[in-house]
Structure formats: C-alpha cells, structure tokens
Image (cartoon, rainbow, N blue to C red):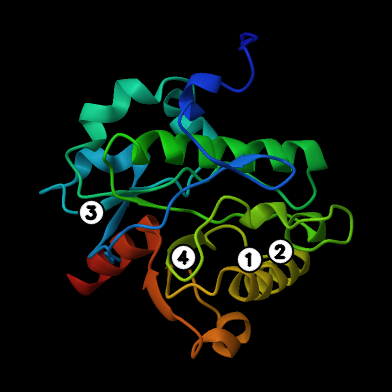
C-alpha cells in the first residue's frame, strides 16, 4: 500500500546553500575544478557488488530503485563515500509525461546533486530531457532540461531503455543536439548504446565516453568466458 508523503516544498533543506538558475529556479550544480572521467560505472542498486569501489555509481535504472536516496540522502553519505564520485540521479523525465512532472524531476535531480556536491562529493551532473518542451523554447522561455548545469565541463546522459521507439529516437537526437549547443560540454559520458545515426554528428565537438549498460556488459563477459 502506497503512502502519501507531504513535505514543505521539495525538501527545502537540500538546497539551503544553493544558487538557482532561470525563472524556474532550478538548483545549480557547479563545474568541478578538474574533469575526472570514471574508469567504470555501476548502477546504484548494485553498488555493493563492486569489488574495489573504484566505479562511479549511476542511477540509470527505475526510479523505485533509488527512491530512498530521494527522501533521505543524508543516510547514504557514508555509503556513497566509498566511491571516488557519483553521477547525479536520473529521475524520470518521460517525453509523454505532463510538463509539471518533467520540471519537478529535473529539480529533484539537481537538488540531490547539489546536496552531495556541498558535502564534498565529486559530482558529475546527469542530463535528462523529455519532449520539445524541455529542450526548446517552444512553450517556456527557457530550456529547463539544461538549467543548473555547468557549461564547458563534464556531463552524463543515459540511453539505456530510451532509444527504442521512433519517438524516443527523435527526442534523443534533438535533445542531444540542443544540449551540445547549450552546454558545449568538454566530456559527455554515455550509459547505454551509442547509435552512429544519433551521435556521429557530434563526435568532433566533445569527447564521448561510452559505458555499456550493466546487463549487456555482464553478458559480454560471460560470453567471452565461454
């Protein structure tokens, strides 16, 4: 049975020291002083399977698997401090979900990212967009999918489970194009597949680092050992 959780405004204590970006006042994640590219990443829900805790936890999995960190990030500080850094939460921003839901989940991702950054964590911001309303100014005067993110730095995106249908591929390409123009990142981490049809156009504008999704990677290891 689900229960209703009432807070005082999206857990305002998570952003007490934050700067806010745009008319929507999305919490800002600052650019790291030095760009660090993870040797490997691991899904948050599988982090205890790490052998040496050298990976960066990522949140490219169903939201229910990281629901607890959304409600109480403080309880995960010691847990995540075992790793050299983290990618911020990938709260779902579905292209066919209501605009308010898309904005709310962008806010949540930035708020938790800011919370961990201010506690000394090396934080790589995840970028997630929905439909055109999130990455263009067709409806709103600003592209809220990119608010609160540093320019000319390092970001991470996830394609796993988000590039199957025609609509998903359309928004993946056009959102990526908008992100490259808006943020001009030096490094883009990509969790999941990297289709040449989508990514080739941008390959000379940034350094793209690809990480296979966890399931595909483990299947590859198993197949390679046979």
Q: Mark 1 to mark 3: distance in Å?
A: 25 Å
Viewport quadrant of the N terminus: top right
The answer to whether mark 3 and mark 2 are in CB contact below 8 A is: no
Which residue is rendered at x = 49% and y = 54% of the image? 126
Which residue is rendered at x = 73% and y = 66% of the image? 171
Element marked by disc 2:
helix
Mark 4 is surrounded, within 10 Å at the Cα level, by few (under 14), some (14 to 19) or many (20 or more) other residues, namely many
Q: Mark 4 to mark 3: distance in Å?
A: 16 Å
Mark 1 is surrounded, within 10 Å at the Cα level, by few (under 14), some (14 to 19) or many (20 or more) other residues, namely many
Q: Is residue 36 above or below residue 66?
A: below
The answer to whether mark 1 and mark 3 are in CB contact below 8 A is: no
Residue identifier under label 2: 168
Residue identifier under label 1: 163
The answer to whether mark 1 and mark 2 are in CB contact below 8 A is: yes
Element marked by disc 4:
loop
Where's residue 95, x and y in %?
A: 75, 53
**Earlier sequence position, callout 3 versus callout 2:** 3
Q: Which of 60/135 is in front?
A: 135
**Earlier sequence position, callout 4 versus callout 2:** 2
**Earlier sequence position, callout 4 versus callout 1:** 1
**Earlier sequence position, callout 4 versus callout 3:** 3
Mark 2 is surrounded, within 10 Å at the Cα level, by few (under 14), some (14 to 19) or many (20 or more) other residues, namely some
Residue identifier under label 4: 192
Where's residue 116, x and y in %?
A: 36, 36
Q: Nearer the viewer, mark 1 or mark 3?
A: 3
**Earlier sequence position, callout 1 versus callout 2:** 1
Q: Which of 23/192 is in front?
A: 23
Q: Mark 1 to mark 2: distance in Å?
A: 5 Å
**Earlier sequence position, callout 1 versus callout 3:** 3
Where's residue 186, x and y in %?
A: 43, 75
Evaluate whether residue 128 shows in this view.
yes
- Residue 55, which numbered label? 3
């Amino acid at each position: 049975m689900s229960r209703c959780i009432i807070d005082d405004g999206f857990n305002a204590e998570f952003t007490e020291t934050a700067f806010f970006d745009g008319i929507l006042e999305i919490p800002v994640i600052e650019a790291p002083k030095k760009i660090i590219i993870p040797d490997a990443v691991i899904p948050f829900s599988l982090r205890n399977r790490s052998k040496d805790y050298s990976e960066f936890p990522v949140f490219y999995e169903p939201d229910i698997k990281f629901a607890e960190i959304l409600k109480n990030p403080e309880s995960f500080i010691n847990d995540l401090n075992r790793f050299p850094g983290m990618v911020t939460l990938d709260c779902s921003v579905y292209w066919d979900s209501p605009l308010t839901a898309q904005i709310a989940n962008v806010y949540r991702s930035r708020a938790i990212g800011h919370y961990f950054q201010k506690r000394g964590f090396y934080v790589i911001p995840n970028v997630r967009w929905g439909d055109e309303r999130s990455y263009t100014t067709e409806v709103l005067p600003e592209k809220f999918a990119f608010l609160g993110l540093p320019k000319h730095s390092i970001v991470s995106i996830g394609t796993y489970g988000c590039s199957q249908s025609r609509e998903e591929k359309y928004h993946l390409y056009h959102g990526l194009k908008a992100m490259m123009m808006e943020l001009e990142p030096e490094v883009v981490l990509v969790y999941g597949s990297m289709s040449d049809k989508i990514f080739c156009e941008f390959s000379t504008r940034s350094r793209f680092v690809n990480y296979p999704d966890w399931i595909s990677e483990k299947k590859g290891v198993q197949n390679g050992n046979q």
